Amino acid sequence: MYTENIKTIEQVITNYFEGIFYGEADKLDACFTETAIIYGDINGVPYQKSKEEYVNGVRNRQSPNELKETFNMKIVGIDVLGNTAMVKVHLPMLGYNYYDYLSLIKFGDYWKIVNKIFCHVA
């Protein structure tokens, strides 16, 4: 069961990465619950958006792929406890060095991101 959960979570994170990198907003949207909130710190400036605001931002900007960036996103670690998980990811893109902590919950057979906190690390 643990290995199956890890593989399913890795697929959600792959979709998350691809949604962000290629500007595939619908794919990104499907990774989150409807009520997910995104919090962050970009150069000391607080950031807070609903999932809908966040996805629309991705939808309306040039993607890293369109800007000819190299895909360097990766999973740093996954911690699963029962039907909850915490995933740390690294997303160097758009001139930033982002690290995200993604909280996921299992709903039946599906994992969804319920919260994202992130920081740009210089």
Image (cartoon, rainbow, N blue to C red):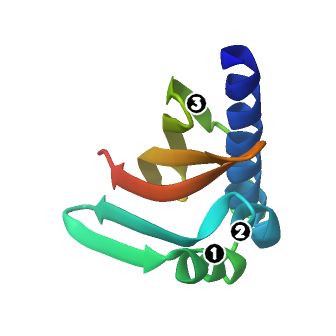
Residue 6, image x and y in percent? 68, 24
Q: Is residue 48 left or right of residue 94?
A: left
The reply to whether residue 70 is in sight is no
The reply to whether the C-beta atoms of the residues labelled 2 and 1 are less than 8 Å apart is yes
First in residue order: circle 2 vs circle 1:
2
Q: Measuring 72% from the left and 44% from the top, which residue is drawn there?
A: 12
Which amino acid does the dot numbered 3 rest on? Ile
Q: Earlier in the sequence, mark 3 or mark 2?
A: 2
Label located before the other in sequence (3 or 1) = 1
The percent position of residue 37, horizontal first and vertical second, equals: 44, 69
107 relative to 78, above or below: below
Within-10-Å neighbours for mark 1: few <14, some 14–19, many 20+: many
Question: What residue is rendered at 64% in x and 82% in y?
Answer: 56
Q: Residue at 70% across / 32% down in the picture?
A: 10
Closer-to-camera residue (70/117): 117
Between residue 107 and residue 59, name the one nearer to us.
107
Measured as percent of width and height from the top left, residue 121 is found at 31, 45
The image shows residue 6, relative to residue 96, as above or below, that is above
For label 1, the residue is: 55
Q: Nearer the viewer, mark 2 or mark 1?
A: 2
Badge 2 marks a residue whose secondary structure is helix
The numbered disc on residue 93 is: none
User: Crowding near pointer 2: few (<14 within 10 Å), some, many (20+)?
Assistant: many
Task: Tell me the CA gap for discs 3 and 1.
Answer: 20 Å
- Position of 116 compared to 70: left or right? left
Dot 1: element: helix
- Name the residue tied to disc 3: 75
Which residue is tagged 2?
A: 29
Label 2 to label 1: alpha-carbon separation:
6 Å
Above or below, 48 relative to 43? below
